[in-house]
Amino acid sequence: MLPASLCAKIMVFWRITRTIEVVLNERAVAKQKQIKLCFFALHSTFTIFVPKFIRTLMAIMDLVYNTQKEKLILPEYGRNVQQMVDYCVTIPDREERTRCAYTIIQIMGNLFPQIRDSEDYKHKLWDHLAIMSDFKLDIDFPYEVVKRESLASKPQKVEYKLDHIKYRHYGKIIELMIDEACKYPDGPEKDALVSLIANHMKKLIFSINKDGVEDEKILKDLYHYSKGKINLDPATYKLREFKEAPAATQASTGKKKKKK
């Protein structure tokens, strides 16, 4: 029979040993779980993400941009409609090719419904179809479509008569008015017309020079324009004074400032 004190020591030693064994087992299980998680992560990476990355990279390398493709004849209809037209040209049967052309016309009309308000919108669509096919579409068009020659033709030159203007800041009309004023006989009617012309010349100068306009300069230009036929003395002949219009204010515009 062992003494009680020795039995107590043995029990304490057994409990300590058992606790150490349990802790070691738990650590071993946790380490096994970590190993399994690491293996699962590596497996997922190499079986899912790496092939997906490779496929994405190959897709990027195989991309074909619109700048690398054939230039569209009418870009507003897009490449899909252009491919439909190209396919329609290659159809051997004439009736089937015609039906395909009518279908394409409906699609083109749906893309731009706003042009349906115009009277000849159908005619325009058939013209566009002929142009997009490079005039190779062999069907019975319901309208007389545009010809290739008319697209390459240049517009007629617009004749524009360039007259010499002595003082460009006055313009050509002032020259013509002065010529007409010189033809008037002396009298109140001619004096009124000359006054209107001179004041208008001063107003034109004032529009480009706000610092000030001298009457002597205006009357001198009027003398040269009329070739000496209109000679006004700056000392006795005074023109109107022009002032710059004030900037629009809140009171003049009638708009109220919004409260913040």
Image (cartoon, rainbow, N blue to C red):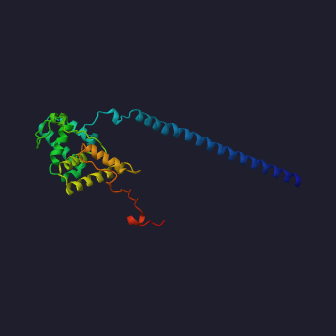
Q: Is residue 90 visible?
A: no
Query: Which image quadrant for residue 224?
Result: top left
Q: Quadrant of residue 247?
A: bottom left
Q: Where does residue 118 sit, x and y in percent of width and height?
A: 17, 51
Q: Is residue 38 left or right of residue 10?
A: left
Between 100 and 255, which is closer to the camera in this rendering? 255
Expressed as whole percent of the image width and height from the top left, the position of residue 18 reads 75, 49
Residue at x 29% of width, y 34% of height: 71
Q: Nearer the viewer, residue 249 or 172?
A: 172
Left or right, residue 15 beside residue 143: right
Query: Where is residue 58 shown, x and y percent of the image?
Result: 42, 33
Residue at 31% from the left image edge and 33% from the top image edge: 69
What residue is rendered at 37% in x and 50% in y? 214
Tell me what residue is drawn at x 30 percent, y 53 percent: 199
Q: Position of residue 211 (x, y in %)?
A: 41, 50
Asked if residue 201 can be seen in this view, the reply is yes
Q: Is residue 223 left or right of residue 247?
A: left
